[in-house]
Amino acid sequence: MEMIHPLNNEVSPLNSEKLTPETQEEEEDYKENGVLIQSPRLSHNVLEKDSKAPSNVREKGETGHVSNSYSVVQSPIASNGNTDGADGAHPVTSDTNGLQELNKLVPGGRENWRKKGDFLLSVIGYAVDLGNVWRFPYICYQNGGGAFLLPYFMMAVFGGIPLFYMELALGQYHRTGAISIWAKICPIFKGIGYAICIVDLYVSFYYNTVISWALYYLYSSLTSKLPWADCNNAWNTENCTNYFLKDNSTWTKFSTSPAEEFYVLNLILARSRQVLMVQKSNGLHDLGGLNWHLVICLLVIFTVVYFSIWKGVRTSGKVVWVTATLPYVVLFILLVRGATLPGAWRGILFYVRPEWKKLFAIRVWIDAATQIFFSLGPGFGVLLAFASYNKFNNNCYMDALLTSTVNCLTSFLSGFVIFTILGYMAEKRNEEVADVAKDLGPSLLFITYAEGIANLPAPTFFAIIFFVMLITLGLDSTFAGLEGVITAVLDEYSVLLKKRREWFVLGLIVVCFLGSLTTTTFGGAYVVKFFEEYATGAAIIAVVFLEAIAVSWFYGMKRFCRAVQKMLGFSPGLFWQICWVAISPFFLLRLLRSITPEVEGNETPNSGVHLNDV
């Protein structure tokens, strides 16, 4: 595989380089909205047919690159004042009338972001989701505390961020969604686009249910006394122990907290279920009836989602200014409050104290790779879709670095928010923090953290802002995931659906709502676990592995680097090329093998779905 090596005195960040005129891209034909565009000679071949075309519209090397889009976009000017066109020697001339004439040749115009901040907040909102709050803190302390940051950082640099950057660049250059983009990269891999849409639908079937749980908690918090604050409710059992209010209470291995009995995922300890009601289900084979208050919450969530994305990125781009920024305000409030609680220091030390010996365990590195991959979220078609609405010369390189950094720092910050409360609870229980922090996944938020909030001064206020934060974190990711599907389908079937976006989005929302109803049954928690465990993990890693191979080895690193150079004025450096060609595919292949369970001869694929694993 041929690499593009840096030239003297033309080195940009991370060993990026300019391209020589001899390495300009070969002639390519692009098809947009049913119209065949010969991009290398667009202004010459097409304008010859229009004798009225402006005389000052030159050939592509002079007018700038025509992106694979619904509109004609000028190339950025290189640092030496030259264009990045085929001849590389003529300055870009600005001709409004000429561009307008060229735009008329391509029916319709592609929607763009209202402003750069809309795009950045949308990407940050997508990457920073519920997993940053509940999964990273648990993974971090379980794998060596502060020592875990070393493998986490290395996996981000060599695996997660290169893939993140690659998808942003592909989407911005080709300006199309996850299905039709493969006609421009390697048509035989077009099935990847459809696989991405299917995986996104699976995610929507269970992820929005988790948001509906947070909405139900928010509704339950609208009272002067939180319902999971004591053991005086009809659903409580004899094992319910409220050690916060009674100094002489004893916590045993049979004890359950009020929060655990209000909404519990651990089938071993709990005997009554207020939220999930899983006692009315025997497993996946017997889900029971619908839990109607969760159905209503789910309907509210999907209604909000529809009216946020039905008009396109110009609508959702406004919404994310609230949903993507509010979580940081709440995190800061909760961090300040938690840091002032007795025992908070115990939780923080437990969280960050490094255990260097754990770095010798392969499981730690696998967990780091898994966390960074699913946190940044390449492979879901979202980055391709969002970037496709950017201006052609937008600096997607800096966008990738900025949003990835914000995502990683948010994960680390969330750990302090969680563990200050866990240290406080350990102080009250007179236990070790490790014994309190036994929950993982949603139960860390809906049981452990909810219990801590219930025993703070002004618990209603902190409960409301906490669950509002969870809802906004989830909504951002839902907006993004569905936009990935919408953009992919509308671009692939633009003739049929382009002017019917609102109706298509409505149909998609209805499908997602109906598909989510199984997760609102009495056994819905089993379904959520099933989807999370088997429908997305291995599938999306396989998709991104094939995507990396297709771009690096079939589309070609030379061609991809030339595409980036046309947009940004510099080509990706040797570091990025090596990551894309070798390191990232190996990273994904190793990760896929590590998360695929071995099924024994007497096991069925879903025999391992247990709620106490959540």
Image (spheres, helix red, strand yellow):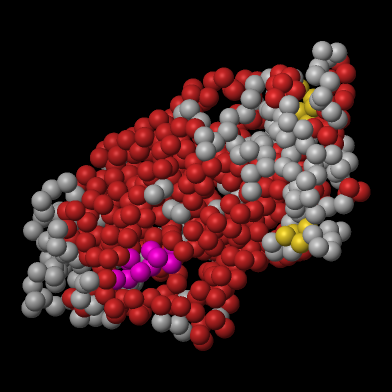
* Quadrant showing the N terminus: bottom right
Relative to 424, is 33 above or below?
above
Relative to 503, is 417 above or below?
below
Q: Quadrant of residue 91?
A: top right
Relative to 495, is 81 above or below?
below
* Quadrant showing the C terminus: bottom left
Q: In which quarter of the image is residue 515?
A: top left
Position of residue 234 in the picture relative to residue 581 (left or right):
left
Which is nearer the eye, 173 or 460? 173
Which is nearer the eye, 45 or 301? 45
Q: Farthest residue to the bottom: give it.
A: 357
The answer to whether residue 83 of the structure is visible from this angle is yes
Position of residue 89 in the picture relative to residue 340 (left or right):
right
Question: How far across and how far down the image is residue 268, in percent?
Answer: 29, 66
| Residue 185 drawn in magenta | no
What is the magenta range?
Answer: 411-420
Q: Is the magenta stretch mostly helix, strand or loop?
A: helix
Question: How far across and how far down the image is residue 152, in percent?
Answer: 54, 70
Seen at 41% across and 77% down, the residue is 352
Seen at 58% across and 30% down, the residue is 111
Q: Please tell me how many numbered marks the rendered image carries.
A: 0
| Residue 413 drawn in magenta | yes
Seen at 83% across and 52% down, the residue is 19
Relative to 274, is 484 above or below?
above
Which is nearer the eye, 220 or 232? 220
Q: Quadrant of residue 43?
A: top right
Question: How far across and how far down the image is residue 66, in percent?
Answer: 76, 33
Question: How far across and how far down the image is residue 514, in percent?
Answer: 42, 34
The answer to whether residue 206 of the structure is visible from this angle is no
Position of residue 148 in the picture relative to residue 78 (left or right):
left
